[in-house]
Image: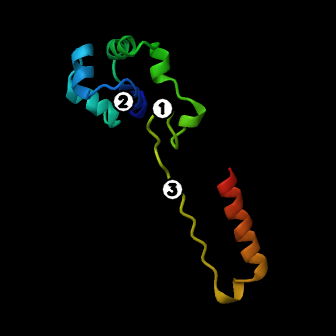
Amino acid sequence: MDGYKLKALRIEKGMSLSKLSEQTGISKSYLSLIERKIQKNPSLEILGKLAETFGVAVEDLIRIEKEESGLFCKGLLQVKSKLKVEIELSDDQLTTEKLNQIKKLIDAIITN
């Protein structure tokens, strides 16, 4: 289960960890472990309680959407990512052609 998805659902419903714990009977500390991705495989019983509380199917809690492939998460939370590209060129390699290639690479990264 994606802990970010659980946290997004909880926040979307305006719930604190304490309130979710009360409604599900799942300890607040265990819910926190799930949200922080320390506990990644809660039991079907836990998933069932969460699904019932949020009014979704268990499958919806564990399904990974294309947009959630590690960079973004639907809902209120977005996992921000950074891409750092470092290009090292000596003075004799730094030509107009190389600079244009670097610019095209950066443009391709930004537009995709």
Q: Position of residue 92 (x, y in %)?
A: 70, 89
Q: Which residue is mark 1?
A: 75
Q: Which residue is mark 2?
A: 11
**Mark 3 belongs to which amino acid?**
Lys
- Among numbered discs 1 and 2, the one appearing first in the sequence: 2
The residue at 67%/63% (across/down) is 106
Q: Position of residue 86 (x, y in %)?
A: 57, 70
Cα separation, mark 1 vs mark 2, equals 9 Å
Is residue 18 or residue 68 the one in the foreground?
Answer: 18
- Among numbered discs 3 and 2, the one appearing first in the sequence: 2
Circle 3: element type: loop
Q: Position of residue 61 (x, y in %)?
A: 45, 21
Q: Is residue 32 left or right of residue 87?
A: left
Cα separation, mark 3 vs mark 2, equals 25 Å
For disc 1, the neighbor class at 10 Å (few under 14, some 14 to 19, many from 20) is: few
Q: Which residue is mark 3?
A: 82
For disc 3, the neighbor class at 10 Å (few under 14, some 14 to 19, many from 20) is: few
Is residue 16 or residue 62 the one in the foreground?
Answer: 16
